[in-house]
Each structure stands twice: as structure tokens, then as C-alpha cells.
Amino acid sequence: MDNETKNDVVIVHLDRERELRFGHKALKKINATGQSLTSDGDGDELNFEELERIFFYGLEKDARDNGEQLTLEMMEDILDEAPSYAYLMEKMQEAMKIAMNGFDEGNFQTPVAAPVNREQRRASGVGKKA
């Protein structure tokens, strides 16, 4: 694999070195479950089952590439090999950041509205003082 291809993965040290990658398929699966990836500010923290599922989706490609039949049931034992919960969170955030690289509001073009002529402004009330 060349360096350019390797830049979209994060190596996580668990039962072995694994590539954690959130490609389109993984992100789509995470989104389909309705799981939040971070706390939403209302005290709804990411729970352990969600963490297992998110890592499962992010490690599926690595497992396929290595001829491994990864199952969700295996994730508890695999994640137990991590040095700490903080390590898992850091690696997950790093992989998500790579997956979403360049995907922020600053990169979206704001649609330009067609100019409104005087007749349309009068009909819609645009520009009238209150």
C-alpha cells in the first residue's frame, strides 16, 4: 500500500495492530443505527455497546483484508486489549477526523439567491420597514 492510501487509516494496538478506518460503508452503518459519536451535551454519553459497534464498523475492512471473520461479539474482548478507554476514544476521534477531513461548513459554497427585482420585492414585502 502506498503512503497516500495509508493516510486514511489509524493504527490501533489491540489484540494485534489493526487499521481503524471509517470509510463510506462504515459511516453509513453508524448513521443507520442512529448512534451518536460524541456526547450531545445533554448528558447522553457514548456508551460501551455503541463504542463496540463503532469500532466494529471501523475495523471490518482490516479484518476482511486479513482474512478474519470479525463479529460484533468479538469486540468486547478485542477492545479489552486497549491500554485504556481514553486510548480508544482518542483513536476513534482521530479516525473520524480523517474520515471527515475537509467536511465542514467552511468548505460548502453558500448558494447565491437569484436577484430579486423591484416588483418581486414589493410583492413579498422584502425591504419594507417595520
Image (cartoon, rainbow, N blue to C red):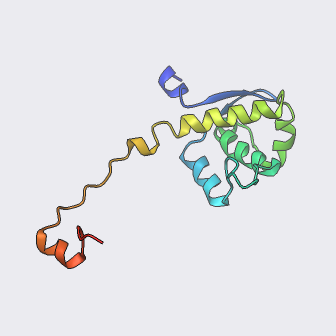
Using the rendered view, name the quadrant where residue 21 is placed.
top right
Closer to the camera, 50 or 113?
A: 113
Task: Residue 25: tell me if it is visible.
Answer: yes
The image position of residue 110, as x and y in percent, is 32, 51
Q: Answer with left or right where residue 3 lies relative to residue 60.
A: left
Q: Which residue is drawn at 19% across and 62% down?
A: 114
Residue that lies at the very extreme toward the bottom in this rendered image? 123
- The quarter in which the N terminus is drawn is top right
In the rendered view, would you say 99 is above or below 10? below
Residue that lies at the very extreme toward the left in this rendered image? 118
Q: Residue at x 84, y 49 (%)?
A: 73
Q: Which residue is drawn at 64% across and 39% down?
A: 61
The image position of residue 34, as x and y in percent, is 66, 60
- The quarter in which the C terminus is drawn is bottom left
In the rendered view, would you say 49 is above or below 34? above
Q: Answer with left or right where residue 113 lies relative to residue 85.
A: left
Count the marks: how many?
A: 0
Q: Residue at x 59, y 49 (%)?
A: 27
Using the rendered view, name the quadrant where residue 105 is placed.
top left
Closer to the camera, 106 or 7?
A: 106
Q: Answer with left or right where residue 112 lies relative to residue 118.
A: right
In the rendered view, would you say 11 is above or below 107? above
